Image: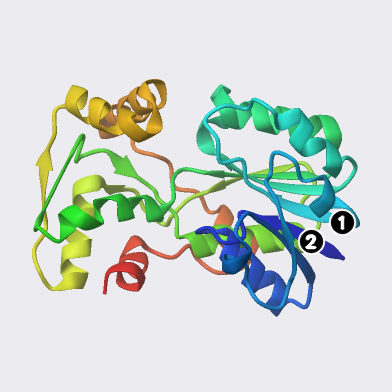
Amino acid sequence: MNVLVTGATGHTGRHVVAGLKAAGVDTRVLVRDLAKAPDGVDVVQGDITDPAEAAAGVDAVYLLWPFFTADGIERAVEPFRGKKIVYLSAMSAEDGGVWGDVEAAVEKVTDDWTFLRVTGLATNALAWAQQVGTGVVRAAYGQAKRSVVHERDVADMAVEALTGDHAKRIYLVTGPESLAHAEQVRLIGEVLGTPVRWEEQPPEEAKAELSAYLGAEFAASAVNHWASLVEDPEPVSLDVAQVTGHPARPFEEWAREHFS
């Protein structure tokens, strides 16, 4: 088979490429910057909004949709009609939003789809990196409990889905435990050997700060979601272990890889 990986230079995509190559699968990547393309694969320069050239001749695609709306998704998925599509989605897709809209578009073009609904990527903690260096991370809802997942676990799930029979399956992809934001920061400090503490930020201030790069609507949605996780933590799923054959990697392991 021949598999196309979109987002091939990103947090999950680069590991998907590595996993497919290790499995001996012919791999093509769609990238905007040729200089960043991985070695040993077929490379097509372009954008996911117009993937027709990259889609030609492939049997399956690892699909990312890195936008805050689903505008243009029908055109983007049409070249994959009848092919296997493994889409990196989000747990909130069950409530609609952009992830739900993308899932609906995928279902219209193929019956061979798999949705990897992620609670959250551990790589989001990299947003705290600059503050970590000061010893204090100031953000909203330190007691929001999240079951964030290592990007390599997402990639392992994707490779299994791309190379096996997982048609019409929806997987909840999480880490092995639900950890408060403040606890994640403490663990990063342990890895660094320097204490890092959490400082609570007023929610409205956090929304204003995040809206600068997420947009007001998405920023408000994110902060409100964190508020809900104080009393109602994100779930922990066993899907990673059941599909890949290994337990989900803990946050501490992710922190050692990215902060040590």
The total of numbered circles placed on residues is: 2
Image quadrant in which the N terminus is located:
bottom right
Q: Is 13 positioned to the left or the right of 144 in the image?
A: right
Give the mark, 1 or 2, whose residue is nearer the N terminus. Answer: 2
Q: In front here: 36 or 157?
A: 36
Q: Amino acid at mark 1?
A: Asp
Tell me if label 1 and label 2 are in contact, CB under 8 Å: yes
Q: Secondary structure at mark 1?
A: loop
Is residue 131 depicted above or below 201 in this figure? below
Query: Residue 195 vs residue 177: left or right?
Result: left
Q: Tell me the crowding category of disc 2: few under 14, some 14 to 19, or many 20 or more residues within 10 angstroms, Cα based.
A: many
Residue behind mark 1? 59
| Residue at position x 83%, y 51% in the image | 53
Residue 234 falls left or right of residue 190: right
The residue carrying mark 2 is 3
- Relative image position of residue 114 (x, y in whole percent): 72, 46
Residue 111 can be seen, yes or no: no
Q: Residue at x 65, y 68 (%)?
A: 17
Image quadrant where one finds the C terminus: bottom left
Q: CA distance from mark 1 to mark 2?
A: 6 Å
In this image, 120 relative to 185: left or right?
A: right
Check disc 2 and give the amino acid type: Val
* Residue 179, image x, y percentages: 29, 50
Q: Residues within 10 Å of mark 1 (few under 14, many from 20)?
A: some
